[in-house]
Image (cartoon, rainbow, N blue to C red):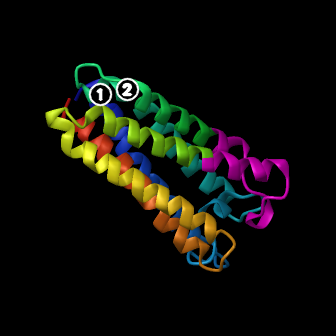
Amino acid sequence: MTILQILAVCGMLSPIIYTAMWIICGNLDSDYNHIRDDISSLFAVGAPNKRLAQSFVITESFLLFVFFIGLHEGINDGGGSIVGPIVLLISSILGIMVALFFPLDEGGEFTTLRGKMHIILVVVMGLLTIAGMVALWIRLQFVSIWSGFATFSLISAIASLIGVIISGIFAAGKDRGIIERIMVTPFQLYYFVLSLMVFLNN
């Protein structure tokens, strides 16, 4: 197995660990409701399983960061634009910062500067990731072995943007938990498929 394939495995593990986090930690808390409550509440200040949930998020964010370090070389398309990989790398760094330093306030609220920074950084992360998807679509659409993925990248960007908008509209609603889970699905699926493509092509 090559170094790039090892990094790709890290990328594939990241969305699996993230999904396992909200399933496991959510089920450990009898007061938590997957339909009603957002994912970030699981590692908010005072959450019953904060340390466990935070360890999951730190791990998956770091794995994604490690994968994105090698993404530019892993794409192996003859040396296209580095914009997409760099934007995705920055987004993963913000994810680590959120997990380490900016949890939501107690009860999943965002009244303090720390809680508000959580919301701001998560939104910026999402927008950067969408920008990275678009950048990779532009880079790869005419590369034969990657052209199918390029189309997937554009579709993922559109679906993710729609999800972010809908999630924002219903952020205070009683169904925000399930809406957020639907919203993050295109992101997590994209990370896995991108990692798999790098693994198969190296």
Q: Quadrant of the C terminus?
A: top left
Q: Position of residue 87 (x, y in %)?
A: 49, 33
Dot 2: element: loop
Q: Residue at x 37, y 53 (%)?
A: 156
- Tag 2: amino acid: Gly
> Is residue 15 shown above or below 97?
below
The question of residue 196 being in magenta is answered with no
Identify residue for label 1: 74
**What segment carries the magenta color?**
97-123
Q: Residue at x 63, y 72 (%)?
A: 37
Quarter of the figure with residue 34: bottom right
Identify residue for label 2: 70
- Tag 1: amino acid: Gly
In the displayed structure, does residue 99 sit left or right of residue 61? right
Q: Position of residue 116 (x, y in %)?
A: 77, 52
Is residue 131 visible in the rendered structure shown here?
yes
Q: Residue at x 23, y 20 (%)?
A: 78
Please tell me which residue lies in front, 98 or 2: 98
> Is residue 140 shown above or below 184?
above
Quarter of the figure with residue 39: bottom right
Characterize the local packing of mark 2: few (<14), some (14-19) or many (20 or more) Cα atoms within 10 angstroms. Answer: some
Is residue 24 visible in the rendered structure shown here?
no
Q: Are marks 2 and 1 in contact (CB under 8 Å)?
A: yes
Please tell me which residue lies in front, 46 or 92: 92
The question of residue 102 being in magenta is answered with yes
